[in-house]
Image (cartoon, rainbow, N blue to C red):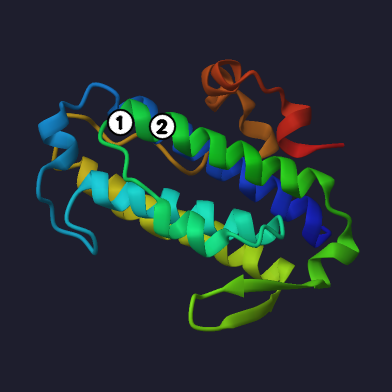
Amino acid sequence: MELLPFLRTQVRANRLANHRLHTAMAPLSHEEFHAPRTSFFPSLAATLNHILAVDIYYIAALHGEADMEAQWAAFLPCDTVDQLAAAQARADERFIALLDRLVPEHLDEIIDLDRGSHVQRERRGHVIAHLVNHQVHHRGQAHAMLAGTSIPPPQLDEFLLPSEAHLRAADMQALGWDEQRLFGA
C-alpha cells in the first residue's frame, strides 16, 4: 500500500469517526457538553474545541496560508455540539480536499509552521500524519468522557475495513459518500 492512498483513507476515517461521535452527542444538553470531566482537557466541549482549533491551524499550514497563527489566535470555541459538529465537518472536508489534490511528491515538500516566535519547518507528510494522530488521540479522550453521560459512546473503530461496509452504511448515506469515495480505486 502506498502512503498517499493510506493517508487519504485516514482523513476520511477521521471524518467518519467525527460524524459518528458528534451524531451520538447531539442529544447532550449544553450543561452536559460543558460539564467538568476527567481527562487532559476538563470537558467534552474543551476537548473537541481543542481538536478543531488545532485542525484549523495545521490545515491552514498545509494549504500554505500565511495567517495560520492568526487563525489559531482568532479561534472562538463552539458553545454547542451542533456548532462544533458543523465547524469540524468543514475542517474535515477541507482536509480531505487537500489530500485529494496531492500527489506523492507533495508529501516530501517542506512547509512552514508559524509558531509566533519562530517558523518551524516540517515535511508535509509528517504534518498530515501528526494531525491524523492528534485527532485520534483526543477523540479517544472525548469518547471515554462520553461514557460518563447518558449517551452510550458510539463505535469508532472496527468499521473501516472494505469488507465491513454494512457497519457504516447509515453513516455513509448521511455523509453522501460511497465506498469509492472512502477507499478510492
For image coordinates 59% across by 59% down, the residue present is 67
Q: Are marks 1 and 2 in contact (CB under 8 Å)?
A: yes
For image coordinates 47% across by 61% down, the residue present is 134
**Secondary structure of the residue carrying numbered label 2:** helix
User: In the rendering, at what x and y percent does residue 169 appear?
Assistant: 58, 19
Q: Which amino acid type is shown beneath numbered disc 2?
A: Ala
Q: Distance from label 1 to label 2 (Cα)?
A: 6 Å
Which of the image's four quarters has the C terminus? top right
**Secondary structure of the residue carrying numbered label 1:** helix
Q: Which residue is mark 1?
A: 81
Is residue 55 positioned above or below 185 on the image?
Answer: below
Residue 108 as seen in the image, left or right of residue 33: right
Near-viewer residue (73 or 17): 73
Q: Which amino acid type is shown beneath numbered disc 1?
A: Val
Residue 85's tag is: 2
Residue 56 as seen in the image, left or right of residue 99: left
User: In the rendering, at what x and y percent does residue 158 appear?
Assistant: 51, 42
Q: Circle 1: is it few (<14), some (14-19), or many (20+) Cα within 10 Å? A: many
User: In the rendering, at what x and y percent does residue 85 appear?
Assistant: 41, 32
